[in-house]
Structure formats: structure tokens, C-alpha cells
Amino acid sequence: MSQTPEPDSDLRVLGTAMAGASEQFLQTTREVAAGATPESAIALLLLAVSEISAAGSRLGAIEDIVPATRFEPDAGPEADIEPLRLSLANVLEGVDAYSEVPDPLIAIETSKASLSDDLADVAANLAVGLQHHRAGHFAEALWWWQFSYLSVWGERAASAGRVLISLIGHMRLDVEDDVAADAEYDALHAVDRDTVPVTQARTQTRGAQGAPPAGEDQEGPVAGPGAHGPGVEDDDAGPADR
């Protein structure tokens, strides 16, 4: 496996994009954990998880990044994510816990998981890469983001995203049986009111306009004297008419 001394221009662009996505994810999760937007917490988390998953997929699609040094440089103390985890668990109380299949390729047994743990694990790994990037360790930051994406946070983000989509689906689509029945009844009767047979509509139109004018019936004007049409002579016509 070849080493990556310093990232080239393309990798630097990728690293800059990954740093921006990491900062955005951390900012969103902190705002949600603080209870700033309780009415839109699930939607904001879904957007944050989807965007960071898309950014991480680019790391998973490229070759392995290997730093030039064998040891991880010191980028300072790691961020304490535990307060974020606890705050998220408080905000998500009632919908935090869920069941999952840890690895559907090798086992079908389910295990317990939680959204707060997933989001905190993603945040913790993103924060480490962000520290390296801010310290100027660009290759180390990319290596860490890529390695932790494949080993930890990519899977946790995917699991959290699936649960968040499921939550929004239940919130939007689940209704009580009587509410659904009332809505179906109203919809069916609305169709009945709007759909009027053509013959009935024509009859109603004639009734609204009144009786046809004198000299006309439903088939058109009644032909008067001299109006029988070509080739038909009027018996009462005078010599001048003939």
C-alpha cells in the first residue's frame, strides 16, 4: 500500500469539502441537542445525516489514503462528545431507541441501538478529522475521515438515516382509522358532486335558458313558406315567384 505524502489538489478540494460538511453536521446536531428547534428536530437531523453520508461516500469511493508518517500527529485534546450524546437523548426521548441488524451480510440477529448514540459517534469521528485539518495535517485528516467512515461513522450515519426516514414516514402517513374513513368519505362525495352526467348537464342548461324561441324546436329552425330548400316549389307561390 503506497503512502500519501501530501494530498494533491483534488484531494485538498475533497478535504476542504469534508471539513465544511463536518462543521455543518456538528453545528446542526448541537443546535438540535440544545432544543433550539424542537418542532423540526427530526427533519434537520435527516438533512444533516443525509448530507454527511453523501460527503463520506466520496471517501469510500476512492483508493485508501495512507499518511507518510506511521504515527498520528498530535492535534490537541479530543472534543468531549458525551454532553452532546446526553442532550440528544433528552431531545429524542420516546423515539431514540430502535432495533437493527448490525451486519446483514453475516447475521440476521437484531440488537438495540439509539439515534443519540449514532449521531454522537458520527460527531466524535468527524471532530477528530476536523482537528487534524485545522492543524494543517491534511493527509492525516483525510485518512482519519476515510478510515473512520469505513469502520464506524458511515454505518452509524446510514442506520440513523434509515430510522429518521422511518420516523418522518410515520409522522406524515400514520392516521387514526376514523380519520382515514372520514377523509375517504369526503373524497368520494366530492367526486360525486363534481362528476355530472353529460345528458343531465345539457338538460339543466336548457332548463336554465328557458323554452326555445318561437319557430324553433330541438332539431333547429322550422322552415316557413319558400324555405323548403332547393328543388322544392311552394304551391302558393305566384307567377312572379315561378
Image (cartoon, rainbow, N blue to C red):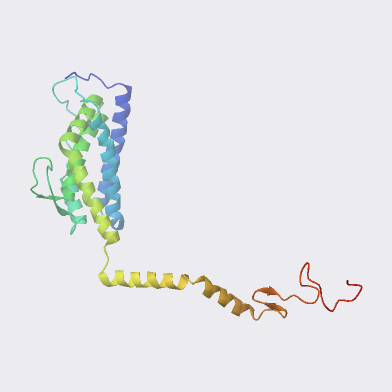
* Quadrant of the image occupied by residue 155: top left
* Quadrant of the image occupied by residue 169: bottom left
Q: Is residue 30 left or right of residue 238?
A: left
Q: Is residue 187 left or right of residue 155?
A: right
* Quadrant of the image occupied by residue 107: top left
**Residue 69, how many percent across, how many down?**
16, 20
Relative vertical location of residue 139 with respect to residue 20 in this rendering, above or below? above
Q: How many marks?
A: 0
Residue 220 seen in the figure: yes
In terms of depth relative to the viewer, which is nearer, 9 or 112?
112
Taking the spot 30% from the left edge, 59% from the top edge, the residue there is: 172
Taking the spot 24% from the left edge, 34% from the top edge, the residue there is: 130
**Residue 94, how many percent across, how many down?**
18, 59
Quadrant holding the N terminus:
top left
**Residue 72, how many percent across, how many down?**
15, 26
**Residue 57, how many percent across, how many down?**
25, 35
Residue 79 seen in the figure: no
Relative vertical location of residue 231 with respect to residue 127 in this rendering, above or below? below
In terms of depth relative to the viewer, which is nearer, 87 or 50?
50
